[in-house]
Image: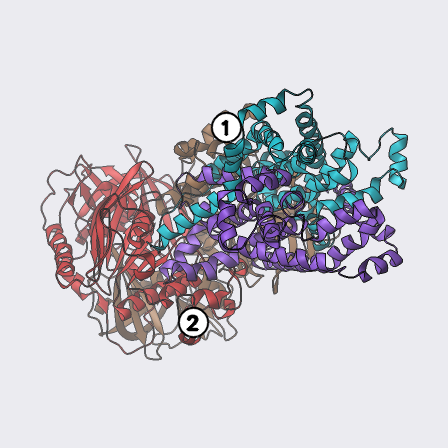
Chain colours: A purple, B cyan, C brown, D red
Amino acid sequence: MLGVVGVLGAVAVWLALLGPLGALFAHLSPSALRTSLSAPHALSPLVTSVEASAVALGVLVAVGTPLAWAMTRNRLPGPRVWESGMLVMLLMPPLVIGLLLVFFVGPLTPIGHGLARLHLSASNTFFALVVAEIYEAAPYYVLGAAAAFTSVEPELEEHAWLLGDTWWRSFRRVTLPLAAPGLASALAMAWARAMGAFGAVLVIAYHPYGLPMQIWVTLQQTGLAAALPFALLLLVVALPLPVLAYVWTARARIASGPDASVGDPAL
Amino acid sequence: MLGVVGVLGAVAVWLALLGPLGALFAHLSPSALRTSLSAPHALSPLVTSVEASAVALGVLVAVGTPLAWAMTRNRLPGPRVWESGMLVMLLMPPLVIGLLLVFFVGPLTPIGHGLARLHLSASNTFFALVVAEIYEAAPYYVLGAAAAFTSVEPELEEHAWLLGDTWWRSFRRVTLPLAAPGLASALAMAWARAMGAFGAVLVIAYHPYGLPMQIWVTLQQTGLAAALPFALLLLVVALPLPVLAYVWTARARIASGPDASVGDPAL
Amino acid sequence: MLLRRRSDSSRSRARATHDQAGLRFDVAVDRRTVVVQMVLAVGAGECVAIVGPSGAGKSTVLAAIAGLVPLRSGSVWLDGRFLSSSDRPAVPLRERRVGLLTQRAGLFPHLDGASNIGYGLPGGAAHARVGELAQALGLEDVLGARPARMSAGQRQRVGLARVLAADPRVVLLDEPFSALDPELRRKTGAWVSGEVRRRQVPCLLVTHDLAEAQRVASRVAVLEGGACLQVAEPEVVAREPATQAVARLVGYDAFVGVELVRPLLSASGAIAPGATTVGVRGDLVSLAPENVSVGRGSQTSPGVELVGRLRSMVASGAAVEASVVLDDGSEVPVRLAPGQSLPRIGAEVRLHVHNPACFDASGRLVQGAGGKPSAAAPALGRAPVPHGATAG
Amino acid sequence: MLLRRRSDSSRSRARATHDQAGLRFDVAVDRRTVVVQMVLAVGAGECVAIVGPSGAGKSTVLAAIAGLVPLRSGSVWLDGRFLSSSDRPAVPLRERRVGLLTQRAGLFPHLDGASNIGYGLPGGAAHARVGELAQALGLEDVLGARPARMSAGQRQRVGLARVLAADPRVVLLDEPFSALDPELRRKTGAWVSGEVRRRQVPCLLVTHDLAEAQRVASRVAVLEGGACLQVAEPEVVAREPATQAVARLVGYDAFVGVELVRPLLSASGAIAPGATTVGVRGDLVSLAPENVSVGRGSQTSPGVELVGRLRSMVASGAAVEASVVLDDGSEVPVRLAPGQSLPRIGAEVRLHVHNPACFDASGRLVQGAGGKPSAAAPALGRAPVPHGATAG
């Protein structure tokens, strides 16, 4: 009994959470889709978003992965402090992040002056968009990656070292493959934050339009229905990759995991 | 060598990611703080945000926890489908979520009509704010909780059942305590999304102002500096609880984990 | 004699079917590439050991009885109560009252020793009961420690205490003493067999050590490759292994094509018909009297004599384990008692194999190692001397 | 004789110090509440077993040598090369060439058997080497399987193969055969000792089974409560355990306050001075001739005689393990050879304890169980017969 009720409940909750997606397909008119997407430069916000997110994620992976690893292997004094810092950043609303970025890397700050000498500006530029996305996505990636590394037993790394591996080789052959499912999930979350970054972007990178900004502008200028095609665009172009990556790593997780066991006290 | 470089690199990355927080304290003038917070109803956006987030999280815990559990214990046919659905919701930018919610629960939809009969409206109401926050935060909680449940060996649940526990008793005495760190982290992320929800809120719940909306309005009406006090307010009032919860569960994680081991191939 | 024993075990199965006390099962379970099949009845208070090599399917049988793996066919009954079968809904795990100790013990990592042991007990009764069990198993020191801080042997005993604390109606133990040192192994084994008898519950014990099976169990089931090859009293399995495969499992170290120097005599004095191979155990062989200073009276017991060269001698405890190579290249182990003087390595020696087990060409038993008159068997047992624990 | 053995082992330690081959260590390691301390030199090609009860600190010693736990004091040297100490930087793990097999084997869960075994090998050489090792250890079937699909015994052997594939300069094995059945245990043990000798590397083996230690190792170090109680040849430890604690570890089942019926004779014929307790092992005791039909010539060897009542008899393999209760309540185990006829349970019996080990009031050895003339010991070994594997 409990089993059947549980399954039905889970299905209901899941459908409710995915309801808005159904609404998208129900309300999308083919003609609106054609009109929106055939406009000149209709695809450029998507390209901008994908490019900026890719750059942001590249930076995050490069600097966030070592940070996450150091945090989980007790390499840093006071491990709690580092984790709490990331948590504070996680809990900052994006709008606040944007606001603070103005005071941290905006044109009038010391860092802004430095950037200007490199002919970069963190205000209404592609660079600013990337910075905003990095800061919105960073805590998700770093905390997710840290959790993934925590799940790898240090004993296995020690065995790899005793078998003659350098740190880097053991990381590549043992730590990374074992942390892969968790890292993929962290990456997917970070990608989602970067692609959907709106709060921080609204404050420091109104131009060039990424997809969220394009939707916001269309919403204000033309109305709700006109924004729907961009939502679909996002789903079709930007989603398959992370979803596939996630499903693939889920399979890897199952293959290396223990045998499934059966047994239900509730039947 | 590698060890020292690694630690310094990690510290640099961490400081760069927390830089904006430093900017907050550097630019916050006490007089502006006093002016902003002594205005009539200055604290009401914070109260609105905390209340809405608490309700949203309550709903999420109540319906998302069973869903996450069912997803990880192979109770549902086609486990990949359920996970992928949550991932799609995760990857939806908040602005798109808001847009789609208009077409899903807005006043002109069938569900909207049903809500109207209950004297509820999902447009510019506290109810709308809660709905927007639930949808922004849900995938973070459900996927995080699912990961937490995955980390609990089904063998332990089977032992509890064999020792005479009902499903609910074993869940309370074994599954929940063992999944607690992961659940706390999922909860912290969901709380962060709910408190900072802006994209979806901007579309369907402009009123009543939560903290992000208050910041946005202040930003537009008064300027950057005037919005800073609200950011501080958020940090002081809303952050300590999740940070403490996280640190506490981290300690529990350490206490039940294996002995720490030492050994560094890179020294 | 083989026939007599077989009827013994089928009689005890029949008894269990009638009065319904104890565990009865007849299961087939899918396991990777093979199907594990086993039929057995275990009486109340009886302990049966499942012996076999790694990968024989021993743990799978326990999991099937506990209800953790689905049955391909067959059913499980406990005290006359239906537990599960392949074609009707199984009894929920929590109502089975099956006590299962798995190889990894499966302790709850977030609970300390006392809470683990008392997990299945209602709050009030727990404290005293946990204390008793901890004392019996020497676990007082780890009552406050989490499993991560315990040694493997302590985890195993905490798991054992947890199983018995919950008052199970059947006890299933998977290699419960593997992480214990010999002394604790003996003591814990004696305690378990005492508890099983006192509580009058059936017990199934998985092990790969026949001596351990003998200490704790009254019958042994030999499992290999998913098939149950023999079920009998431990001493019967040791003396009359049904096949060469069973003989290898229960400690026969070598199999020698029969090469008779003196005629092979059975206990009744006749030559065993059809035997082509004899199974040899180190402790059933002695060097012939002319090679050793202290005779063992080998002339008086029937057996075969073999000739070979002494290859190696290695100390084992206070005794010596020697190895003799026969002319056909096969190697025979010999266990020399302490105090025996030793021939030189490389010397030609005569071996007297006391009452070897004899097998035919297909590996089936023709003649058991009937060294001990079978009439003596009922004399084995424990005296009703009122006196503490009965550690063997 | 005790003195002679002791000088033997200190001589081999001195040799290792001079020509620098092999492993030398002198370590103290913090472990929860106790400090584990041990000094030892292991020669190239030599295998030393560390024996002791659960929680004695055996695994901690291996971890300290491998460099996985910090030293409180002392240092570790391998082939004359400094490895680590408490006061100067240790050699990185990857340059130590220490082969460590932990109790849980520590296989990489995402790699199949072949990749696990060949992990430490460069790509080209791996395939053939892995094939050889897999064949030697009977692992052909699991080369394509991940650890989760292997049995505990298979995991253990894959871990062993992985350690030896990487050509370590020292081999550290923590209970490497615990999950194997007796036959595999013997075969794998013989293979390991052969490999260690062939490669001329030192080997440290942790076990709680003296018989296993004897099969594989040439010396035994007894560890209890973090302290090393005795280091000696296995047969010396079995015959002359330094203390009562060691005696208990190596299989002495009972300790009896001396109650002389006949005078206690040492090997040289004199009464051992100062002895207050004798240690008794089941295989060193026989029932006195008047109670058994087949005598064992017990009159010819020195020893003590005890009187008690037969309490229980339990079959053990083809033999019988009996238990006799003495007047003072202590229990003495007796191992009866197959073919011996048996007295009734409850009957009064006389026990002849051959060459018991004798201890003084503080538990230190006064007189070893010198059953075998010590001059015979050098005769033990393996003959240079050109003939396959030397499975004991």
- Evaluate whether label 1 is on the same chain as label 2: no
Question: Which residue does the image show at 54% across and 30% down from the upper left?
Answer: B28
Q: How many marks?
A: 2
Give x and y (percent) for residue D278: 21, 41
In the drawing, what numbered circle is on residue D130?
Answer: 2
Residue C166: percent from left, percent from top = 56, 34
Point out which mark residue C129 bears.
Answer: 1
- Viewer-nearest residue: C156 or C211: C156
Q: Nearer the viewer, residue D68 or B158?
A: D68
**Does C228 appear above or below D55?**
below
Residue type pointed to by label 1: Arg
The vertical placement of B164 against C64, above or below, is above
* Circle 1: element type: helix
Q: Quadrant of residue C78?
A: top right
Instruction: Report the Cα–Cα distance between label 1 and label 2.
Output: 52 Å
Counting from the top left corner in percent of width and height, residue C160 is at 49, 40
Q: Secondary structure at mark 2?
A: helix
Inspect the image, locate mark 2, and give the three-letter code of the amino acid beneath it: Val
Q: Is residue A4 left or right of residue D320?
A: right
Between tags 1 and 2, which lies in front?
2
Query: Disc number at residue B6?
Result: none
Is the residue marked by circle 1 packed among few (<14), some (14-19), or many (20+) residues within 10 Å? some
Q: Between residues C381 and A170, which one lies in front from this camera angle?
A: A170
Q: Is residue B162 visible?
A: no
